[in-house]
Amino acid sequence: RGYVNRREANESQELWFSRRRGAVFAHADTYCTAAVSLQLSGRKRWRLMPAPPLASSADLVDYHDGRIYGSGKWKPAFEGTVEEGEAIVFPPGLFHETFVPEDNSPCTASSTFQLQLPAPSGYVRAFLPSLALSHLYSEGHC
């Protein structure tokens, strides 16, 4: 398990830099594995939401940056602040947005990477109807 996750983390690492009051609109990534965001400096406020229930493909939600806002389906279920040195782990298909508070350091840095193991099988089982109709499958990511 260690080698697989180390290789995946090294190959998928992204660095993010934000100024005070910087934000990332709500979106769901195209990863089919769990993602980790490690706050290297400063702090970031997160709001998260599982994929919304979908009755059919006619209910598809646009998973790209900020597009869920106009659908009326953006209803964050969790929110919290990740401080410097802390991390947040989230499963595939989870909508999330971030905001850097005004009273933060002038520039924050974070690193995002994916983990292959453990597989998020319990989460996938619980949300399979919504995930199966999501961009992860309709766009062929998983």
Image (tube, helix red, strand yellow):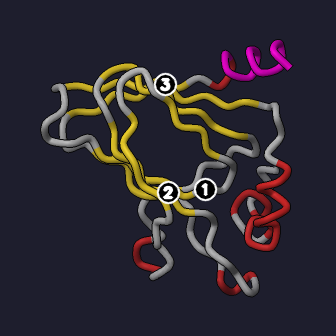
**Mark 2 lies on residue:** 48
Relative to residue 120, is residue 112 drawn left or right?
Answer: left
Please say if 40 is above or below 88.
Answer: above
Amino acid tagged 3 = Ser
Please say if 103 is above or below 132.
Answer: above
* In the foreground, 101 or 86: 86
Amino acid tagged 1 = Leu
Asked which secondary structure carries label 2, the reply is: strand
Write the residue at 68% across / 47% down: 91
Per the model, the C-alpha gap separating discs 1 and 3 is 18 Å
Amino acid tagged 2 = Leu
Asked which secondary structure carries label 3, the reply is: strand
**Mark 1 lies on residue:** 94
Asked which secondary structure carries label 1, the reply is: loop
Sequence-wise, the earlier of marks 1 and 3 is 1
Q: In this picture, which residue range is highlighted in magenta? A: 1-10
**Mark 3 lies on residue:** 111
Q: Do tag 2 and tag 3 residues touch (Cβ < 8 Å)?
A: no
Main secondary-structure element of the magenta-colored stretch: helix
Counting from the top left corner in percent of width and height, residue 96 is at: 49, 54
Q: How many C-alpha atoms fall within 10 Å of the one at disc 3: few (<14), some, or many (≥20)?
A: some
Write the residue at 31% across / 32% down: 43
Q: Do tag 1 and tag 3 residues touch (Cβ < 8 Å)?
A: no
- How many marks the image carries: the answer is 3
Write the residue at 33% across / 38% down: 44
Q: Is residue 114 magenta?
A: no
